[in-house]
Image (spheres, rainbow, N blue to C red):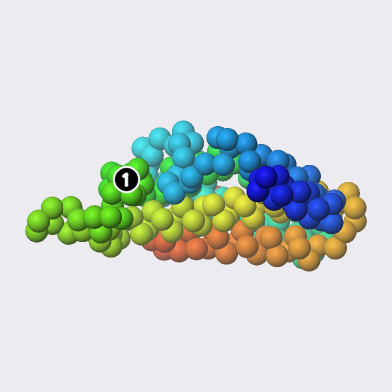
């Protein structure tokens, strides 16, 4: 009954939503109660990233190219050239897995400790991270884990913003709508890319940009 009530509320909100968002919200409401659809995402899911060039300038180049595409789209929107903005966004991977795979080819890998904590959260909580006498707690700060977590967050934020911007630019072209929201979406995407690239050595970012 609780799920039914929530779905009903969501459907009401959907009916009041702008046309460009209604379909997406309805699909989200309908699938959120299907067993197996909503899953935990504490750790990145496998998207086929090999990681054989992890942490290198070579692996950073595609990410810098995404940032460049977002910047091009933003300039085009400011100039009122929506077709150019759409073209710039379409040059960025349009599916979620390939998009995130670009980032995961460069990002810090998930450590064994992170995997253990994720699959044994109950044990870690009730033992307060105890990992044996004289050993640091399993929840002790770790620079690489912190870096991986931040990369993961920026990657997800970038995908969400780019995906929204791609749908929004299409709507603006078809409906001749205002571009204020589109501009905000592109700013979010740019901020996420800036955050991600800010975690990489500045010399590597410069070298990657020189290869574009």
Q: In percent of the image, x 51 and y 57: which residue is there? A: 154
Q: Which of the 4 image quadrants contains residue 129?
A: bottom left
Secondary element at tag 1? loop
**Vertical side of 58 occupied by 193: above or below:** below
**Residue 179 image point, x, y percent:** 81, 62
Does 110 sit left or right of 69 as displayed? left
Does 109 sit left or right of 132 as displayed? right
Q: Residue furthest left?
A: 134
**Vertical side of 122 occupied by 79: above or below:** below
Quadrant containing the N terminus is top right
In the rendered picture of this protein, how many numbered marks are placed on residues? 1
Q: In percent of the image, x 78 and y 66: which residue is there? A: 180
**Residue 56 image point, x, y percent:** 38, 48
Q: Which of the 4 image quadrants contains residue 28?
A: top right
Q: In percent of the image, x 45 and y 44: which residue is there? A: 44
Q: Is residue 117 visible?
A: no
Q: Which residue is mark 1?
A: 120
Residue in front for this viewpoint, 125 or 207: 125
Q: Is residue 40 visible?
A: yes
């Amino acid at each position: 009954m609780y799920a039914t009530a929530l779905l009903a509320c969501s459907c009401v909100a959907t009916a009041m939503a702008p046309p460009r968002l209604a379909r997406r919200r309805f699909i989200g409401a309908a699938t959120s109660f299907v067993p197996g659809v909503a899953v935990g995402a504490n750790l990145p899911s496998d998207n086929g990233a090999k990681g054989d060039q992890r942490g290198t300038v070579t692996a950073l180049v595609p990410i810098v190219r995404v940032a460049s595409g977002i910047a091009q789209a933003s300039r085009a929107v400011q100039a009122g050239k929506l077709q150019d903005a759409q073209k710039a966004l379409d040059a960025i991977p349009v599916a979620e897995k390939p998009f995130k795979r670009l980032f995961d080819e460069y990002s810090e890998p998930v450590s064994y400790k992170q995997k253990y904590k994720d699959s044994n959260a109950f044990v870690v909580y009730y033992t307060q991270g105890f990992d044996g006498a004289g050993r640091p707690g399993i929840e002790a700060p770790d620079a690489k884990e912190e870096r991986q977590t931040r990369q993961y967050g920026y990657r997800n934020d970038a995908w969400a913003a780019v995906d929204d911007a791609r749908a929004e630019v299409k709507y603006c072209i078809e409906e001749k709508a205002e571009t204020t929201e589109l501009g905000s979406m592109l700013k979010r995407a740019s901020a996420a890319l800036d955050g991600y690239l800010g975690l990489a050595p500045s010399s590597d970012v410069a070298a990657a940009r020189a290869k574009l």
